[in-house]
Amino acid sequence: MTQAMTLPIPAAVGNIDAYIQAANRYPMLSEAEETGLARRFRNEGDVEAARQLVLSHLRLVISVARNYLGYGLPHADLIQEGNIGLMTAVKRFDPTRGVRLVSFAIHWIKAEIHNYILKNWRLVKVATTKAQRKLFFNLRSLKNDYEGVSTLSGTQAAEVAARLKVKREEVVEMETRLMGRDLALEGSPDDGDEAFAPIDYLADSRYEPTRVIEGKAIARLHDEGLQEALSVLDPRSRRIVEARWLHAGEAATLHELAAEFDVSAERIRQIEVKALQKMRGALAEA
């Protein structure tokens, strides 16, 4: 049993600062230790091995969760949701693939935190499709570049749309959702007997057909269309695109891929550009 397992479990502490201090005392595992524990859990169902893998990566969850404090949600809740993602990653982790758990887990940690933010940031969801969820987080980040601006102008919205490769109308619509506020449907008791609350006149549009069809179409395009677009590439181009854009952990650099294929970094960049152009054409046809 490693030294990390002699320390108290962070969940037993009384506040978030104490939890963070306790979690940071767990030492990170070496690659050999990590692989051994992962094999024990995967091949033998050893729960203690899984527990050690989780505890040694709690500091990663804390670090990722800290990046989402700007959404006004409790840090402890963000960490809790991230821990769920970490446990999912440990369960799915395959040590035979030659990837460290930290690179594999960060995708699952962020996914759980994103879902939590989207469910709790507003009473009414601001993003329901994959494209909208991506736009939600990217738009908030890019708006920080326009200091002192509460609402994007038409020119600024066009600039953001160009950077995110979406339509200007989509940026404007998402910003409107972000700027909106929650409205009490029942009204307030202080409004008096003559008050007319929103609940009295709002129609039920939960199953509005066009929205259901639109959501399914976008989901199909992202799930099936991506695979179709990748299928038109040659093996080298596909490897470069997947390593640069679709890797669950940190993206490969041009120089790393240049060394892998024994070409220059500029040649890798050229192949990447042509591959992405080819994929966009395939997606447009889809």
Image (cartoon, helix red, strand yellow):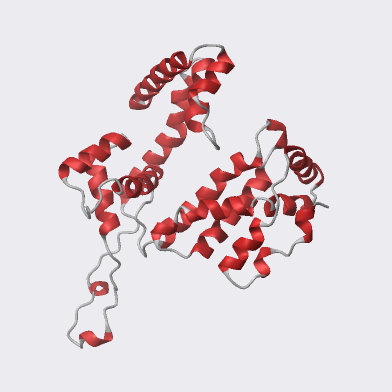
Residue lying at 31% horizontally and 54% vertically, measured from the top left: 208
Q: Estimate the x, y position of residue 46 in percent, counting from the top left.
A: 80, 50
Q: At which x and y percent is residue 146?
A: 25, 47
Q: Position of residue 174 (x, y in %)?
A: 28, 50
Above or below, comparing residue 225 to residue 125 in the picture: above
The image shows residue 9, relative to residue 34, as above or below, that is: below
Q: Nearer the viewer, residue 55 or 109?
A: 55
**Residue 57 higher or lower than 264, as above or below:** below
Residue 22 is left or right of residue 63, and the answer is: right
Residue 256, image x, y percentages: 55, 22
Quadrant of the image containing the C terminus: top left
Q: In the depicted view, which residue is nearer to us: 169 or 253?
A: 253
Report the front residue among 41 and 226.
41
Q: Residue 188: which quarter of the image?
A: bottom left
Let me know if residue 180 appears in the view. Answer: yes
Residue at left 24%, top 54%?
A: 176
Query: In the depicted view, which residue is nearer to us: 230 or 21?
Result: 21
Vertical position of residue 180 compared to residue 171: above or below: below
Q: Residue placed at 65% from the left, 66% from the top?
A: 11
In the image, taking residue 77 as reference, residue 155 lies left or right, namely: left
- Left or right of 198? Residue 56 is right
Q: In percent of the image, x 29 and y 77: which residue is there?
A: 186
Task: State how many labels appear.
Answer: 0
Q: Is residue 239 visible?
A: no
